Image (tube, helix red, strand yellow):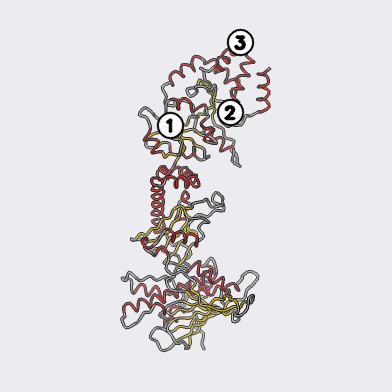
Amino acid sequence: MQKKQFQAESKRLLELMINSIYTHKEIFLRELISNASDALDKMYYKALIDSSIKFNKDDYYIRISIDKDARTLTISDTGIGMTKEELESNLGTIAKSGSWDFKQSNEQKEDINIIGQFGVGFYSAFMVARHVQVISKAFGAEQAFVWESDGVEGYTIAPAQKDTAGTDIILTIKPSSDEENYDEFLEEYKIRSLVKKYSDFIRYPIKMLVTKSRQKEGTKDEYEDYKEDEILNSMVPIWRKNKSELKPEDYEKFYEEKHYGFSKPLSYIHLNLEGITSFRAILYIPENVPFDYYSKEYQKGLELYSNGVLVMSKCADLLPDYFAFVQGLVDSESLSLNISRELLQQDRQLKFIAQKIKEKIKSELLNMLEKERDKYLKFFKNFGKTLKYGVYANFGADKEDLQDLLVFYSSKEKKEVTLSEYVLRMPQDQKYIYYATGESIDRIAKLPQTEAVADKGYEILFFTDDIDEFAIKMMGKYKEKEFKSLSESGDLGLDNDQKDEKKDEKYKDLFQKAKEILKDKVKDVRASQKLKTHPVCISSEGALSLEMEKVLQGLPDNPGVKAEKILEINTSHDVFRALEKAYQDDEPKFELYINLLYDQALIIEGLAVADPMEFSNNICKLMV
């Protein structure tokens, strides 16, 4: 029998396809099953337009068979089959797709849904097989034919025996080597897992004789193996069903089956969008934080399917970083895939899908915030930090999308509130949205800086996350109301501002002397407008706040940046009377007092005292 050469430019093209196009060798099974599904689709379509053909769905399936002794893996279908000419055309010419031709000739038919379009998926078989045999009989034909090839050396076509229409692809698996384990493709467990991973939602049953064990009749402890036909795939995916026929338990079961999490999802979204770019999606918001979520090892992304066939396990482009916690999948018939179906050829459709998914997730979270507050607070406790990072990232490009999803603890409500709720409650004379930062709610509540604002009856937001102030500074305003930190020096929008300016002038020499004693530790020493019952506090001036300094100094690559500190002193406190007397009568004591007040202010703010020994000695001096 004369061997024919592939009708392609050179052997190099086939070598490239076999060795370079596909990232993982296991993809071959997905490609061959997809081709078999296309053949069944063509038969189904033929039955639709030809009333003389009886289409019994039980007669149409894909079968996988393993013969370890012969080292063969066979993928069979009961589809439309191929003539000798089609074998020559479709398999003898690389990148010639019968599915593409079929789709083009029936492009006006909306229900044509063909997976294979590039004509190269079949050749992925040569990644794992040293010899490929294709036995096919076209529907209505009398003669079957066999196509055989060892790869780049060419192929042969000859008459063959086959009783029914369809195609059998028989792969003779390569021997294993030190570098590659080909034996695994002859194991039932591996084939089952690959079908489940890539082809679980092919619409036709994928059957395989699997080995099972049972107790021998008449014995107690003896077992025997037997073979039983098993359908490996689920066929009808949950996302293709109508929402009305699904219950919450169905979504929870699917969540568990896909191993998206170890507990029930907090919420789920079933999305079905028809249009120029059509897609379906099942999205889940987890109840608990994945163990590696806040680590470099965590990979965001949704499973991406094209016509029920998995093309990407983690498509990161479908989710913004601030919604990285979302699990689930997307299935679209509109995607433009590259030749290997492993990567996207262009991102226009993907960007459209990603935008719609982002909008839907935000809508679901807002709905949860409004109607299921306790559930939302549970979500925010786990993933709120991610949303705040989203506000801060990309120079605040996404702050408008995320600001209404943020909640913070309120000094007045004693619970978490939204920024919108805060602004709605603001008195008419209140100029700013006030906030204070610290390690805990209890610690912030005791800060001296909160006194004056609290006395005015104004609400204060408590920031306890490291990212909080970075995010808020990036926002700048909310509904035209500026944010104001109680640790900032200067105008707090209170009616005692002018009084403190007069005090600064009155005690100018005292404050100047104090500044000289503290040297470069502070930028200035001033009378405080914040303090009522406390003698002293530290505030900051400029873009970098005290809390930001603490966060940045805790980083591995500490940049050594420091906030511009202002020592604020309560001129109405008894301590100031003692300070004023020491300034007039006892310079060493005045210096001692200033150093102690500065260290005291640092401790209250949660900042480290530069010299603990000096602080201890100063206390001893005071006592003596």
Q: Quadrant of residue 97?
A: bottom left
Q: Which residue is drawn at 62% across and 12% down?
A: 586
Name the residue at the top extreme: 585
**Counting other residues with Cα less than 10 Å from the Cα at mark 2, is it few (<14), some (14-19), or many (20 or more)?**
many
Q: Are the residues at dot 3 and dot 2 in contact (C-beta closer than 8 Å)?
A: no
Q: Mark 2 points at which residue?
A: 602
Give the spatial CA distance, label 1 vs label 2: 25 Å
Give the spatial CA distance, label 3 vs label 2: 27 Å
Q: Residue at x 41, y 45 (%)?
A: 369
Helix or strand or loop: what does disc 1 sit on? loop
Dot label at residue 585: 3
**Counting other residues with Cα less than 10 Å from the Cα at mark 3, is it few (<14), some (14-19), or many (20 or more)?**
few
In-front residue for pair 586/195? 195
Image position of 357 (left or right of 508): left
Give the spatial CA distance, label 1 vs label 3: 43 Å
Residue 601 in the image, given as x and y percentages of width and height: 57, 26
The C terminus lies in which quarter of the figure? top right
Residue 201 in the image, given as x and y percentages of width and height: 45, 68
Type of the residue with mark 1: Glu
Dot label at residue 251: none
Residue 379 in the image, given as x and y percentages of width and height: 47, 47
Q: Name the residue under label 1.
A: 459
Type of the residue with mark 3: Asp
Type of the residue with mark 2: Leu
